[in-house]
Image (cartoon, helix red, strand yellow):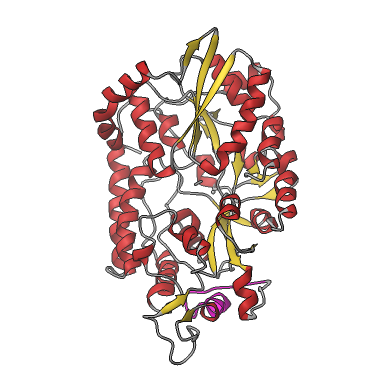
Amino acid sequence: MQRRRQFTDLISFRYPDELKRAQLWREPFRLAPRQWLALSMVAVILLISLVACGGSGAQNGKVHLTYALWESTEQPAYQKSIDEFEKQHPNIEVTIQQTEYDQYWQKLDTEIVAGAAPDVFWSDLTYFPHYAMQGQIMDVTPLIQKDHLDLSIYYPSLLNLYTYQGKYYGLPKDWDTIALFYNKAIFKKMGITVPNELSWNPTDGGSFLKLCQQLTLDKNGHHADQAGFDANAISQYGFVSANLDQEMYWNYIAMNGGKFMDKAYGQHFEYNQPPSVQALQFLVDLILKWHVSPSASETNNSGDAVTQLFARGKAAMIQTGSWNVAYLSKQVNFPFGVIELPAGPKGRISVLNGLSDSINARTPHPQEAWELFKWLASPESQRIVAGMGTVWPGVKSAAPLFADYWKKQGIDVEPFLKEAEGQTVTAPITPAFNESSTKIHDDFNLMFLGQASVQQATNKAVQDGDAVIQASGG
């Protein structure tokens, strides 16, 4: 889901200088902490892989590949793409293996340890460094050179994200930014004009807080900024603030001048520094001080809680990524729109992420897996996926198809593109991010609940996150 330098001819991104300077080394293979847990499941996975009818293998003169992804809403588009691939490659059959994001990575780790991993699978920037450094995904540089692939068709910054020691381990699949989704019916009913420009600051909340207060109602019809407002009887919230990194607090930390880590492939988080603490305090205050957001008890440890609150009409606005346009279009029974994030003290800054496919380094069918990988990165495949309104494509020429699809559905997705043209940041880059983020998330749960102060929670999060990275040798 689940973000730089420059998107040639179209998009300009900031790309951390530290990443270009980072000196990485290949370590001998060793199991990460979560993989020791996975060992307990290895025997089961091996047994399943031997008796299963599907999966990788050769049957009836055909090679059978498995392609793993996590977004169920995107599966139909990729199935359509793979159907076309199979027509062009009659000797290859592909089975899609869909696993929800919360279980995807542990399942993948277990399968890698068992030698039963999918042949090709989705990769995220936050998890890619670990797999690349452990040699668990294939270096596709020689294959790119052998087949003379034209890499100029991709946005350069996306192309650079999935490189390690100057070698390619992935090609751009898609990209996304974060924006505000709003319920048009609520705005119309309340007579509120959709603002062209919003701003926030950690002192008084700015125009963004004022809008959230206008949109928040108690059961007696009082707004959150009116006398008599009952914070214990709220019927409609203006916004949903939640313990979500990519979709929520990374954006505000960046807009307040904060940093996530000291450097790319570093060993020290910076969540407890003043700019980050101020941004996080603002998000906590939306819940506990200004009462314009539901309690964290409704959103902690539930990735779908934010979108479900919006779909039920309980929240007038939410903040999420462009991947949720397709999902929400099927979940809601009211019209919704998209506007850019509120600009902070340092301007408007969105997290930008790009996904890539990876090839299992131990696939028994490396040539066929490469053919599938190459197809999924091709303009032909990405036009199919973008044309169904699934994601912004990594291939530049296919981008208008995504915007045109949603324009026909009455949804303007250009705010995502405008944000990508402005300032952006990527996720912290460290090979131990998945383990450290779990610790940080648990510490931040208490902060959003008001059970720990922001300074206490961020100090603990930095301590816990740093310990994981240092223990991993990252």
> Which sits in the foreground, 266 or 320?
320
Query: Residue 347: x and y, percent?
Result: 60, 66
Identify the residue at horizontal 58%, vertical 78% (top origin): 207
Identify the residue at horizontal 62%, vertical 74% (top origin): 187
Q: Is residue 471 left or right of residue 14?
A: left
> Which sits in the foreground, 392 or 66?
66
Query: Residue 177: x and y, percent?
Result: 59, 53
- Residue, far front: 333
| Position above or below: 180 against 70 | below
Figure label count: 0
Examine the image and state in which quarter residue 37 appears: top left
- Residue, far top: 61
Q: Is residue 100 visible?
A: yes
Question: Magenta span has 386?
Answer: no
Query: Residue 422: x and y, percent?
Result: 65, 57
| Position above or below: 301 against 236 | above
Question: Magenta span has 199?
Answer: yes
Query: Residue 190: x and y, percent?
Result: 61, 80
Q: Which residues make up the magenta segment? A: 197-212
Q: Is residue 349 left or right of residue 117?
A: right
